[in-house]
Every structure is written in structure tokens, then in C-alpha cells.
Image (cartoon, grey):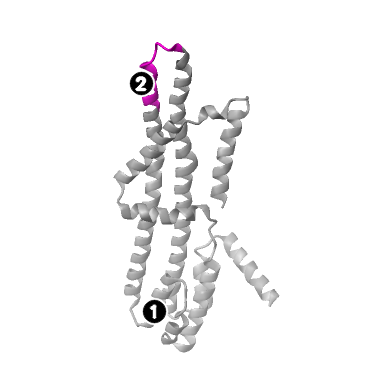
Amino acid sequence: MNTLIGIIAGFACIVVSIMWNGADINGYIDLASIFVVVGGVLAATLASFPMSALKNLLKVIPLAFKSPKSEIDKDIKLILDLANIARREGFLPLEEAVANLDEPFLKKGIMLVSDGSNSDFVRNVMETDISFMQERHSTSQAILLQMSSFAPAFGMIGTLIGLVNMLGNLSDMASLGPNMAVALVTTFYGVILANLLFTPMAKKLKQLSDVESLRKEIMLEGILSIQELENPRIIEEKLQSFLSNTTVKQMKSNSASDGGEK
């Protein structure tokens, strides 16, 4: 949500600054300029990336406008519950414990442990899963960053088109000023799209990807610890070492609060 608020606030600042000294906002609106920038960016992006990557981008773009939900405390609690089951009853009951689990990564790892796979195999399979996830995420981020570089370039192309048209009509001196304004507004569009839309979205997706990678790294460490039948208290300390002191304190505070309510 903060991404959407930031983008709207950015556009609002631009509009207010334009109108601050009584300028006409209509002078900054030109459909031909919008067409060359937006159409050019989309065409260049289509030519640069496979359709499968572009379809995936359309699926993940809405995520950039959502606030990330911290599920790490719930992940750790679930891992500790599974560790207790493994120490009391062995690995086979774990399969039933994760049968209805919504988190596919953790479920997959626990099922491998339950099937008797060795730790090296489990680590290799799960790390490969993480690696491919990061690759998929990085592709979407790369597309947006590339669009960010395309936008100013097509803005400049639109400006050059406007200048050529203007210079081809020098006999009409009255039209020079308006034609120059239209030429420059195309660059204006390109810079805005690059710095207020594409780049912030790419950075937000990078942040979300980092959080998801951290979650999976914690899960993997928890899965391997369960396989070694480590003490749940030791597992908790190990998993919390992935987090900042502030996050750990917040988790403990939430845990104490939940205990108080019960």
C-alpha cells in the first residue's frame, strides 16, 4: 500500500508544482507524446524478453502494491511444533502433521525428512528450490529496471520527433513556442515513468523477494535441525539468529501477549 501512496504522492507533487505559479496543466498533456513513450516502452520490452517472463511479470506486479506480511514468527513456531513431534514420536507422524499445510516449501522439506532422505539430499533439493525462486523474481525485477531505462530513451525520441517537426515549420514563428513545449513534454513523461513508476516497483519486488528468501532459508535450517532431532529450544535460538534483535524482541513480545490473553 505504501508503494501506491508514494506514487500518488509523487504525481501530486508534480501537479502542484506545475500549478504553483498559475501554469496551465493542459499544456503538459499531449496524447502523441504519451503514445510514443508508453507504446515505445511496451514494444521494446516485448522485443527484449520472452512472453513467459512478461506474463509472470503481470502476475507479480500487484504484489508491489501490497504491504509485506511478516510470517516468520509463525514459521518458527510451526517448525518448533514439528520438532517436538519428531523428538516425541519420530519422523513418520510428521507426514500427517503437514498434510494440510499451506506452505509448500516447508511441506516439501518435511515430507523428504519423513521419507528418510539424508540431509545432503534434502539440502540440495531445497536450496535448488530457493535458487530457482530467486531467479524467477530477479527476472521480473530486471524487466522493470529495463523499462525504467527505456522510458527516458523514448522520451528523448519523442522530443527529437517534435524538434524535427518544429524545425520543418520555421516559417510559422507563432507555432515555435507551443511546438517546443510539446517536444519537451515527451522527455518529461519518460523521466516520470522511469523514476516514479518502474524503478520503485522493481525495488519493492526486490524487497519482497529478499523477505521470501529469508523465510525459506529459515525454513531450510529448521527442516535440517528437525532431521537431526535437535532440542527445540536450540532450534529456536538458531532460527532467531537469522533475524535482527528488534524483530526477535517483537516476536517475544507478541508471544508474551498471546500467552497473557489465553
Q: Main secondary structure of the magenta part?
A: helix
Residue 161 among those drawn in magenta: yes
Q: Residues within 10 Å of mark 1 (few under 14, many from 20)?
A: many
Instruction: Tell me the residue that label 1 is attached to.
Output: 111
Mark earlier in primary sequence (1, 2) = 1
How far across and down, in percent of the image, does residue 205 sit?
45, 53
Viewer-side residue, 110 vs 57? 57
Residue that appears at 51% across and 75% down = 78
Where 49 falls versus 223 (above or below)?
Answer: above
Instruction: Please tell me how many numbered marks the rendered image carries.
Output: 2
How far across and down, in percent of the image, does residue 210 sit?
45, 57
Residue 252 among those drawn in magenta: no
Magenta residues?
159-173
- Is residue 234 visible from the viewing direction of this image? no
Residue that appears at 58% across and 29% down = 18
How far across and down, in percent of the image, does residue 211 sit?
48, 59
- Is residue 164 visible from the viewing direction of this image? yes
Which corner quadrant of the image does residue 115 belong to? bottom left
Mark 1: amino acid = Met
Q: Residues within 10 Å of mark 2 (few under 14, many from 20)?
A: few
Viewer-side residue, 154 vs 110? 154
Where 48 falls versus 137 (above or below)?
Answer: above
Side of 244 where 216 appears, left or right:
left
Q: Nearer the viewer, mark 1 or mark 2?
A: 2
Side of 229 where 19 appears, left or right:
right
Residue that appears at 35% across and 16% down = 168
Mark 2: amino acid = Val
Cα separation between marks 1 and 2 = 66 Å
Instruction: Tell me the residue that label 2 is attached to.
Output: 164
- Quadrant location of the C terminus in the rendered image: bottom right
Where 145 falls versus 224 (above or below)?
Answer: above
How far across and down, in percent of the image, does residue 69 sit?
54, 61
